[in-house]
Image: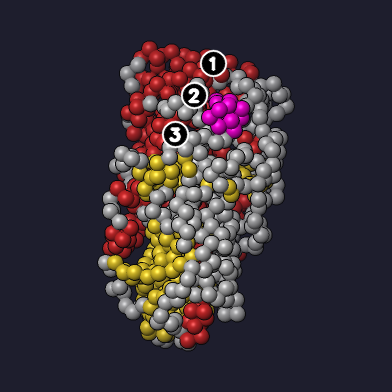
Amino acid sequence: MVSPVPRLSVSPRAALPRRSLLGLLLFAASGTLALAQQANPDQLRAPATPLVTHDPYFSIWSMADHLTDKDTRHWTGKPQSLNGLVRIDGKTYRFLGDDDRDLPALKETSRSLTPTRTIVTFTDAGVEMKLTFLDPDLPQDLVLISRPVTYVDWSVKSTDGQPHQVSVYMDASGMLAANDRTQAVMASRGSIKGLDLLRIGTQEQPILKKFGDDVRIDWGYFYFAVPKNQGAARLAAGNETYRDDFAKDGDIPDEDDLGSARPPQNRYPAAPLLSVVLPLGSVGATAVNRHILLAYDDIYSIEYMHRQLLPYWRTKYASFGEMLSSAEQQFPELQEKSNALDKKLTADLTKVGGPEYADIAILAYRQAFAAHKLVEDADGAPFFMPKENFSNGSISTIDVIYPSAPMFLLLNPKLAEAQLLPVLLYAETPHWRFPFAPHDIGVYPLANGQQYGGGEESEVDQMPVEESGNVILLMAAIAHAEGNADFAKRFWPLLTKWADYLSSKGLDPENQLSTDDFAGHLAHNANLSIKAIEAIGAYGQLAKQLGHPEEAKKYRAMAEEMAKKWVPMAADGDHYKLAFDKPGTWSQKYNLVWDTILGLDLFPASIRKEEIAFYKTKLNNYGLPLDNRETYTKLDWTIWTAGLTDNKQDFQMLVHPVWKFLNETPDRVPMSDWYDTVSAKMVGFQARSPVGGVYIPMLADQAMWKRWVEASK
C-alpha cells in the first residue's frame, strides 16, 4: 500500500508525497435523510448540495439536509459562510447558514438539482420563497464556463391570499477570500455600469504563492454585485453586528466599517463582512423577484511552466468590471438557455439510463466543472486544468482527466482537447525525458512539472502503461467525436512513441501503479493490459484517419494478436482474473468499454457477458467492489462497468446501488468516488472531476453523442 501521509497544505518547495488511503482526512459528520428524500423515496438526497461551483477555489456547498442546518463550506470542508435571513411582516427567519440559531429557520419544503441550478423552496409565514443558485455552465461557450459568476435569485409570493412585507438579507464572510482565519482581510465598495459592488480580500495578496490540496485561495477578491435597476437595495461592508441589526430592525447601517485589516475569525464582531439587504415591499400572489451576483476575481489563475496565466474569460473581456456588467445584462438570456440545457440533458440521461442514472449524472455535472480551471495560454489557447481534489492536489493528472473526460467528450470535445493540451505541450519539452506519458504537471495551481512519484528524475512510482494508454484512448475518442484526427496529428510523434512503449510493455504489465494507485503496485494487471491493447488498437484507428495505411494495418494486427493472447492469460473459469498470475481473483474490467464505444471490436463479446454474469454474484448493498481485495469501489469505474452491459436490467443492477450509496451515505460531502460498498462510508476522495466519467454510457449511443457534439459547435 502507499505510505500514509496527510493531505497537502504546503509551500512551493515542500516535498510531495503520493496519494494514500490512510492519509485522506475525513471531516464530514454523519447526517440523516433529507426532508425531500423522506417524503419521496424515489428522489435522490444529495450528500452535499452545490451552491457556487466554478473552480477548485470558488466552490461552496451546503453539506446538510436543510440550508439552515449547517454553515456553508468550501469543498474541503472548511467554513466559507454565506448567511441568509428573510424578514416577513416584522419577524426574521433564517434561510441559509446556521450562525444565528436563536432565530427560527424558514421551513424548507423542497430542494431540486438540475445540471446548472440548485432550487430550494421555503413555504412558511404565509409566503413561498424560491431560492435559486445558477451556474450557467453551457458547454458550447468556453468564455461563459470560465466566468466566475453565480446568480442568486429570489422569487417570493403570498400563499394565503394576504399581502406580506418582505425583505431579504445575505452576507458573506471574509473566509471566502482567505486560506485560514488568521489572514487579515479588508472590505471595500465600488460601482460599475449597472451594478453596485462590495468586495473582500486579504491584505497580503500572495498571488500563486501556495500549492497543495487542503488549500483555499488567499488572493484576489470575492464580490457581491447588486443590480441598480431592480429597486432599492442597501449594501454595506460591515461586520456581524450588521446581521444582528437586520434581524432586529430589518435594516443595516448606512456607513461601511472600513477599519484596518482584520482576520475573519468566527463570531468576532469586528471581522469584515459583506452585507446586502433587498426590500421586496408588499408581496402578493404575483411573485416578486430579486437577484444578486456572487463573483471572484482571482487576477491570475494558474502558473504554467513559470508563466502566470489569466482566466479564459479574459480572451473576451478587458477587465473584471466589464465581464461583470456583461454577466448582469445576460442574466435573463442565461436563465432561458440554462433551463433549455437542463431539460434536454435530463431527458437524454433518463432515456439512456433511467431516472436513477440521470440523478447521478446531474449531481456530477457541476462538480466535474468545478474541479477544473479554464485558463488561456500565452497564445490564447484554452487549458482546462483539473485539480486532484482530496488527494495530493496534483494539477492536470492524466489518470484524473481520463475518467472525467466522457462528460466533456459528449458536451464539447474541445474541452477534452483543452484538458490534454497543457500535458502534451509539457511532454514535448526536454523536462520530460521518459518514453511514456507523464502523470501530472505539478501541484495546483503551480503547473511547473511533474511532482508525483519520481517526478522528472526517476521512474520510481510512475504509471507508464496507465498514462500512455489513457492519452491515446482519449485522442481516439476526440477524433471519433469530431470526425477528424487533427488534434492527434499535432502530437503524432509523442503518440507514436507511447504506442511503441505499449506494444512492448502493455500486454503483461510489470509491477507498477495504475490509476487505482491507492490499492498499491500490481504486476500482470489484467485490466491494465486491456487498456494497453485498446490503446494500440486506437492508435491504429488514428493512423488510418491520418492517412497512414501501413501503420494502421500494423497496429491493428498487433492489437488483435495481443487480445487473442489476453483471453487464455486472464481466463479463470467463469470470469477473468485480477492479475494473470493470480487464479481465484477478479476485478472490474472497466477499460473494456472502449471496445464498443470506439468500434474497435478487439475482444469477443462473450467476455463482457461472462464478466457481467460474474459481477452479479459479487454485488454488495451499495455496489460492486473494485476487485476481490477490498470491499471498496470507485463510483466512476462502476458506471463504466455498467457500460459493458447489453440490457437495461443488468445496467440498473449496477447503477441502483450507486444511487443508493449517494442517498444513504453518512458522509455529507460533495460526491465521493471512492467508498465502501458494505457500509456506504467514504473511504477517500470528494468533490473530484472523475465523476464526469458517469457520462460514458451516453457515448455508447452514437447518434446521441453526435447530436451533442454538433450542438457544441
Tell me residue 264's x, y (percent).
Answer: 54, 67
**Residue in the foreground of this view, choosing between 95 and 213:** 213
Asked if the residues shown at circle 1 and circle 3 are in contact, with their CB atoms under 8 angstroms apart, the answer is no
- The residue where tag 3 is placed is 423
The residue that appears at 65% across and 41% down in the rendered structure is 20
In this view, the residue in front, 322 or 698, is 322
Query: Mark 1 = which residue?
Result: 504
Looking at the image, residue 597 lies above or below residue 708: above
Q: Quadrant of residue 321?
A: bottom left
Instruction: Report the amino acid beneath label 3.
Output: Val
Say which label, 2 or 3, has the lower sequence index.
3
Residue 650 coordinates in the image, percent (x, y): 57, 39
In this rendering, position of residue 413 left or right of residue 640 = left
Image quadrant in which the C terminus is located:
top left
> Is residue 457 located in the magenta-colored stretch of the structure?
yes
- Which residue is painted at 47% across and 22% down in the image? 498
Residue 161 coordinates in the image, percent (x, y): 41, 84
Give the number of callouts.
Answer: 3
Marks 1 and 3, how far apart at CA: 23 Å
Mark 1 or mark 2, which is nearer the start of the sequence?
Answer: 2
Residue at 68%, 23% (x, y): give it.
Answer: 572
Which region shows up in magenta? 453-465
Of mark 1 and mark 3, the one earlier in the sequence is 3
Q: What residue did someone put label 2 on?
A: 433
Residue 618 visible, this orientation? no
